[in-house]
Structure formats: structure tokens, C-alpha cells
Amino acid sequence: MKEKISAYIDGLFAPYTGAESAQELKSDLLADLDERFDELVAQGKDEATALVETLDSIGDIEETLGEMAALTGALRRQVLNHFSASSLRDSDFSGLALRGGKFDSSDLKGADFSGADLTGGSFKASSLRGANFDRADLTDCNFTVLDLREASFRGAVLVRTRFDKSDLGGTRFGQTRLVDCSFSMSDLRGAEWDGCVVEGGDFQGAGLRGLSFEGVTFRGVSLGRADLKRTSFRGAVLQSVSFQPPFALTNKYYTAIKTICFDGAQMDKLTYNSLRGVGANLTGAICL
């Protein structure tokens, strides 16, 4: 009869064979049921009756098993998503689901994250030079204080992504829509922005010297305190864009503003008048 108890329990736990916590519960439950069966037989009940009463005593534990298996799976995924302080140069993470992944303080030069789901991931203080994030979902990702030189983000999902205090020299953002992203205090010199749309976001104190934003659309973006000397907005669209620093204007700032190219740029009246007020050369700019 005990073989029947064991077979019944095996069937009950079959869907959760991969969950260690479920297997531990299985062993404990089987031991309790065997003890319960022996007690009923000792009380004078025949084995068939004792078997029925033993199995009836189990109750409905499938819901508990399901919850335990789900928790075990979540914990395993969490462990698998932790790659901090690792040497993963040229590693292939393309197309993987790595939500909430931790890659802090790691060597990820040349790593391929193309098409991966990295929502909520963290890459703080890592080396990502030449890494590929094309078409990856980087919503709420943290790329602060790291090396992103020559990395590629073409077609990536960039929503509330933080690139603060990082080196993004030569990084490629082509054909990408950036929403509420932050580049505060980062060096973006040489980065490529062809065909980008930037909606919201902060470039406070960013290094943009000599950078080309030709044809890029900016809406509700703050460029205050950024190094804008010889930056080009030729043919760009500027809507509610702030170039005003949050402190008193200096001769250095006035000089830098005069070097910016706005030829063919289209801007709303607010942006146009703000730039005109600080002495920007708007010859060839279009006020809408």
C-alpha cells in the first residue's frame, strides 16, 4: 500500500520536479503520510481504508506547490541575472531576457546585447567599450560612471535610461527615439545622432563640443551648462529646448553660444527668442 502512496505523491509533484523547494516538501510529506498510514493500521483499520483516509488527509496543496515553484524559478532567474564584478569581454547576450540584470563593475568590452530585454538593468562603473546594444530594450537602465566609447545603441528602446558621468565618445545612437534620458556630466564628443528623436531629458554639463546634431529632433530638452562650442544643429527641429544655464551668464558662455550652427534649424518662438536673447547667431534659422 505504501507503494501506492508514493506513486500518488510522485504524480502530484510531477509538474514541479525542477523546483528544489517542492522536492523538499515532497520528501517531508511522504514521510508524514507513511507515518499516518501506519497509525491507522495500528488502530485496527484495514489497509484499503487506511490508504483512503491517508490520501484524504493531504488536502489541496497544488496551489502551494505552484507558488513554491514560481518562487524558486524567480530566485534562479535572479541569480542568473547577476554578473557584477565579472570578466565577460566579447560575451554573447543577444536576444536574452535579462530584466533587472546586474552588470556593475564588470569588463564587458565588445559584448553583444543586441535585441536583449535589459529593462531595469544596471551597468554602473563597468567597461562597455564597443558593446552592441542595437534594438535592445534599455528602459530604466543605469549606465552611470562607465566607459561606453564606440558602443552602439541604434534602434534601441531608450526610456528613462541614465548615462550620467560616462564617456560616450563615438557612441552610435542613430535612428533611435530617446525619451526622458539623462546624459548629465557625460562626454558625448564624436557620438553619432543621425535620425534621432530626443524627447525630454537632461544634458546638463555634458561635453557636446563640436558634436553634430544635424537633422535631430529635440523636444523639451535641457542643454544648460553643456559645452556647446562649435556644436551643429543644422536642419534640426528644436521645440521647448532650453540653452539657459541655471546660473549667471558668463562671457565664456556667450562666446560658446555664438559658435553654434543653427542653419536651417526649425524652432518654436520660445526657443528662438531664448537663443536670440543670449546672442546666438540665428541667421538661417526658421522660427515657426
Image: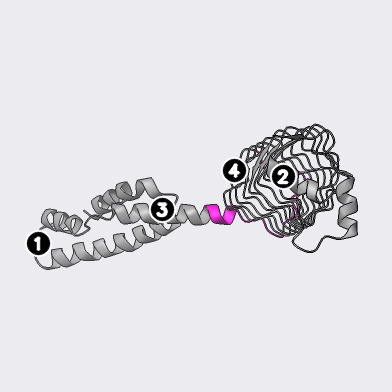
Which residue is at the front of the view, 262 or 154? 262
Q: Is tag 3's residue or tag 1's residue first in the polypeptide sequence? A: 1
Percent of width and height locating residue 242: 72, 50
Please give the label number shown on residue 271: 2
Q: Is residue 85 magenta?
A: yes
Q: In whole angstroms, how far apart are the C-alphas of marks 1 and 4?
A: 59 Å
Q: CA distance from mark 3 to mark 2?
A: 56 Å
Which one is earlier in the sequence, the residue at label 4 or at label 2?
4
Helix, strand or loop under label 2? helix
According to the image, label 3 marks what residue? 69
The residue pinned by badge 4 equals 117
Q: Amino acid at mark 1?
A: Lys
Q: Quick one: 206 or 173, which is closer to the camera? A: 206
Magenta span covers which residues?
77-94
Residue 253 appears in the picture as rendered:
yes
Residue drawn at x 24%, y 50% as measured from the top left:
4
- The local secondary structure at tag 3 comes to helix
For the residue carrying disc 1, how many other residues have a C-alpha within 10 Å: few (<14), some (14-19), or many (20+)?
Answer: some
Question: Considering the image in quadrants, where does the C terminus appear?
Answer: top right
Q: Nearer the viewer, mark 3 or mark 4?
A: 4
Would residue 14 appear left or right of 179 to someone viewing this image? left
Q: Nearer the viewer, residue 29 or 181?
A: 181
Residue 235 bears which disc, if any?
Answer: none
Q: Earlier in the sequence, mark 1 or mark 2?
A: 1
Mark 4: few, some, or many residues within 10 Å (few <14, many ≥20)? many
Report if residue 211 lies within the magenta region.
Answer: no
Examine the rendering and report whether any part of residue 89 can be seen: no
Mark 1 lies on a secondary structure that is loop
Mark 1 and mark 2 residues within 8 Å of each other at the beta carbon: no
Lateral position of residue 270 relative to residue 264, left or right:
left
